[in-house]
Amino acid sequence: MQQKTLALIHTSATLVPVFAALCNKFIPGVKIFNIADDSLIKNTIACGTLTPDTARRVVGYARSAEEAGADYIMFTCSSIGRAVETAATLVNVPVLRVDQPMAAMAVEKGSRIGVIATLSTTLDPTTDLVRRNALQVGKEIELFPRLCEGAFEALMAGDAETHDKLVGDALKEMAESVDLIVLAQASMARVVDANPSLAEKLPILASPPIAMEYLSKIFNT
């Protein structure tokens, strides 16, 4: 059987080693290559939304990955998710947004679903994705979105302690009123890892490991 190739397209180079470790764990026999362009997320944050120009560039990266030999493409940023869905219709290989498997799992496992983010440009697309997944399977859910204001700015300024406290406080507060919590950004998973008692109360879902487990099933069938 010919070895498969997965393209990972990132909006931050810091995610390259994160996903390299996950690929080694879940799909060790698959070839990987990375494309990283942080201007995609920077432009989205600056504009407060995903613009048509940025969406066109997302589609362009999907086409480039296909031309480079990818059998499967995954975009690892939730903020550009709508453009990723468009890209999936314009190339000839499967394209996955990293939070799709997580959204499907959230709808399967809960009815009162919390969504936490540190960026509004990530909170809105993730909440929308969970809502659309519920509609697709005909399940009624309640969504509880929560923006941790100031956390992202603190992390970008090198103040990880403030970021972790803001996210941790939001998680503890939300845990009292929902069935499970969706982390809209992979960067928040570190807070759960550092406070395992949080995950003892209810499921807290992070997209990277869930997406990689999903891909492992695809590549191993």
Image (spheres, rainbow, N blue to C red):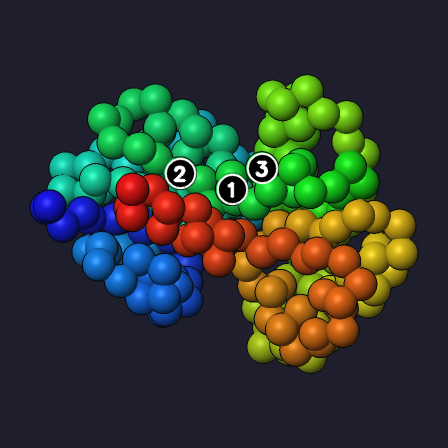
Q: Quadrant of residue 70?
A: top left
Image position of 138 with respect to 17: above or below = above
135 or 40: which is nearer to us? 135
Q: Give the residue type at disc 2.
A: Leu
Within 10 angstroms of label 2, few (less than 14), some, or many (20 or more) residues? many
Q: Give the residue type at disc 3.
A: Ala
Q: Quadrant of residue 137?
A: top right
Q: Mark 2 or mark 3, which has the lower sequence index?
A: 2
Q: Residue at x 40, y 25 (%)?
A: 86
In which quadrant is the C terminus drawn? top left
Find the distance from the CA under tag 2 to the CA under tag 3. Answer: 13 Å
User: On residue 101, which mark appears?
Assistant: 1
Within 10 angstroms of label 1, few (less than 14), some, or many (20 or more) residues? many
Find the distance from the CA under tag 1 to the CA under tag 2. Answer: 9 Å
Image position of 34 with respect to 219: above or below = below
User: On residue 104, which mark appears?
Assistant: 3
Within 10 angstroms of label 3, few (less than 14), some, or many (20 or more) residues? some
Where residue 104 appears, x then y in whole percent? 58, 37
Find the distance from the CA under tag 1 to the CA under tag 3. Answer: 5 Å
Describe the element under mark 2 as helix, strand or loop. Answer: strand
Where residue 90 appears, x then y in whole percent? 29, 23
